[in-house]
Image: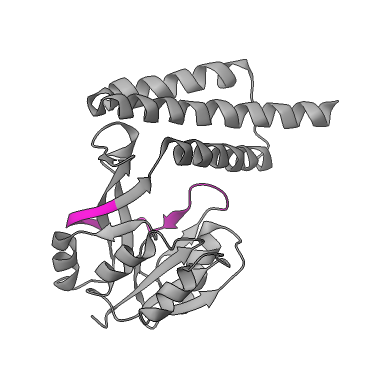
Amino acid sequence: MNQFSVVIITLNEAENIIACLDALKKVSDDILVIDAKSEDETVTICKERGVRVFEKDWVNYSENKNFGNSLSKNDWIISIDADEVLSAELIETIQNLKPKNGKVYALDRISSYCGKWIQYGAWYPDWKVRIFNRKDVQWKGYFVHETLDIPSDFEIIRLKGKLWHFSYKSEEDFEKRLSTYSKLASEELFRKGKKANFLKLWFSPIIRFMRDYFLKKGFLDGKEGFVIARGNASVVYRKYQLVRERNRAIES
């Protein structure tokens, strides 16, 4: 167990963190929580379970995660979100894992929407590299989608077992986070000097919906598949709309 350190970033995750930690304690005895000044019982819960907690103002996903990696006792990192839980099979896989240099390890994440596991569309399959050596791999990206900067010659190994992602517990939660993602995505596009012309504004959302709902078979998830595909398309529309509004404001 001493070969891995676990890093989790949190902000008001008291509802999720217990199940997350209970599973992780079976694969590591060095668990770090980087908390962005939670106002609920997140920190108390973590300390009660013997987790190392560090408070850090929220900057962005990448910087807060890299900060946690720098404080770990081990070079091999397991990066997990507070609303994710290792399955029993995945726990066993990690317990028996002997990580090797030049490799990173991907987990088979499956997400839930209002209590239903989503098995098609843009959400699944959803392999995420979450085990890596901090000497070779770091997080990058400033706004919405943080990614790992993995050397091109590294091999990605897929591990057995599910990573349960208890993501959206209600339609209201889904809509709220879509709004947040739209604003962050628009900020990223604006900072890069991108424009939102007529084609981008109106056709990109349609293409996104068609891809997620039909090409990726989101329709097989029933009503939830439609709602998710529509929501993803709305993010595309909103981000370009916000970019267009900001550019027009500057031009005027």
Above/below status of 167 relative to 136: above
Q: Is residue 195 visible?
A: no
Q: Is residue 26 visible?
A: yes
x 45%, y 29%: residue: 231
Q: Quadrant of the N terminus?
A: bottom left
Magenta span includes 152 = yes
Above/below status of 210 relative to 172: above
Q: Quadrant of the C terminus?
A: top right
User: Does 154 sit left or right of 40 as displayed?
Assistant: left
Tell which of 56 and 4 is nearer to you: 56
Q: Provide residue 70's location: percent of width, then percent of height.
A: 48, 76
Q: Provide residue 9's location: percent of width, then percent of height.
A: 47, 64
| Number of numbered discs overlaid on the protein picture | 0
Tell which of 138 and 233 is nearer to you: 233
When asked about the image quadrant of residue 105, the answer is bottom left
x 46%, y 75%: residue: 44
When asked about the image quadrant of residue 32, the answer is bottom left
x 53%, y 53%: residue: 141
User: Does 132 sit left or right of 23 as displayed?
Assistant: right
- Give the colouring mode of the picture: one colour
User: Does 56 sit left or right of 107 as displayed?
Assistant: right
When asked about the image quadrant of residue 85, the answer is bottom left
The extreme right residue here reads 252
Above/below status of 188 relative to 157: above
Q: Which residues are magenta?
A: 142-164
Q: Provide residue 98's location: percent of width, then percent of height.
A: 18, 73
Magenta span includes 207 = no
Q: Provide residue 49's location: percent of width, then percent of height.
A: 35, 79
